[in-house]
Amino acid sequence: MQGQRRRKNRKGKVEPKVKVESAVVDMATGKTPANAVGEAEGRVLQALAGFFGVLLTEGLLLAGAGFLPAEADSFIQDYLYPSFSPQMLLFLGMSSAYGLWKTGKLPGQQQMK
């Protein structure tokens, strides 16, 4: 019964337990004006999102290549198939490097605040 009262009395915002410190989040919420680091981080995230979209499209084309006409199937097998794995490794490397940069764990990097 008392737990229900607490829920009813607790109106307002629920604060997260983990504070996210990010230039992009601060700019998006209007807490800080845009700076060079935040703009660069936004461009990196846009590039990763675009690259992910390209990989998703290529993956779906590769998965459905057998159901397409023979000309389309041979084009996909000749051009998209050989480049898909290196592109996936490049995406994983870029996203891992971004994660290491964001957490401040690159060699010789100071912890970001």
Image (cartoon, grey):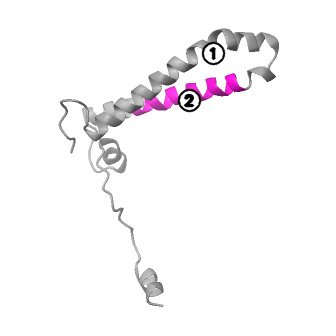
Give the label on residue 94, or none.
none
Q: Splitting the image into 4 quarters, where does residue 75 fall?
A: top right
**Which residue of the protein is positioned furthest toward the bottom in this rendering?**
1
Magenta highlight: main SS: helix
Position of residue 26 measured from the top left corner of the image (x, y, whole percent): 31, 47
Position of residue 52 measured from the top left corner of the image (x, y, whole percent): 52, 30
Which of 44 and 69 lies nearest the eye of the viewer?
69
In the image, residue 112 above or below residue 83: below
Residue span colored magenta: 45-63
Position of residue 44 measured from the top left corner of the image (x, y, whole percent): 38, 30
In the image, residue 98 above or below residue 29: above
Estimate how packed mark 1 is, as few (under 14), some (14 to 19) or many (20 or more) residues with alpha carbons within 10 Å.
Answer: some
Tell me the element at label 2. Answer: helix
Q: CA distance from mark 1 to mark 2?
A: 16 Å
Instruction: Pick the quarter of the image with the C terminus.
Output: top left
Judged by depth in the image, the label closer to the viewer, 1 or 2, is 1
Q: Splitting the image into 4 quarters, where does residue 93 fall?
A: top left
The amino acid type found where label 2 is placed reads: Gly
The amino acid type found where label 1 is placed reads: Tyr
Q: Earlier in the sequence, mark 1 or mark 2?
A: 2
What residue is at 70 percent from the left and 26 percent from the top?
63
Q: Which residue is mark 1?
A: 81
On whether residue 82 falls in the magenta region, the answer is: no
Position of residue 11 measured from the top left corner of the image (x, y, whole percent): 41, 76
What residue is at 28 percent from the left and 51 percent from the top?
31
What residue is at 44 percent from the left and 89 percent from the top?
2
Q: Which residue is mark 2?
A: 53
In the image, residue 12 above or below residue 9: above
Estimate how packed mark 2 is, as few (under 14), some (14 to 19) or many (20 or more) residues with alpha carbons within 10 Å.
Answer: few
What residue is at 41 percent from the left and 83 percent from the top?
6
In the image, residue 92 above or below residue 12: above
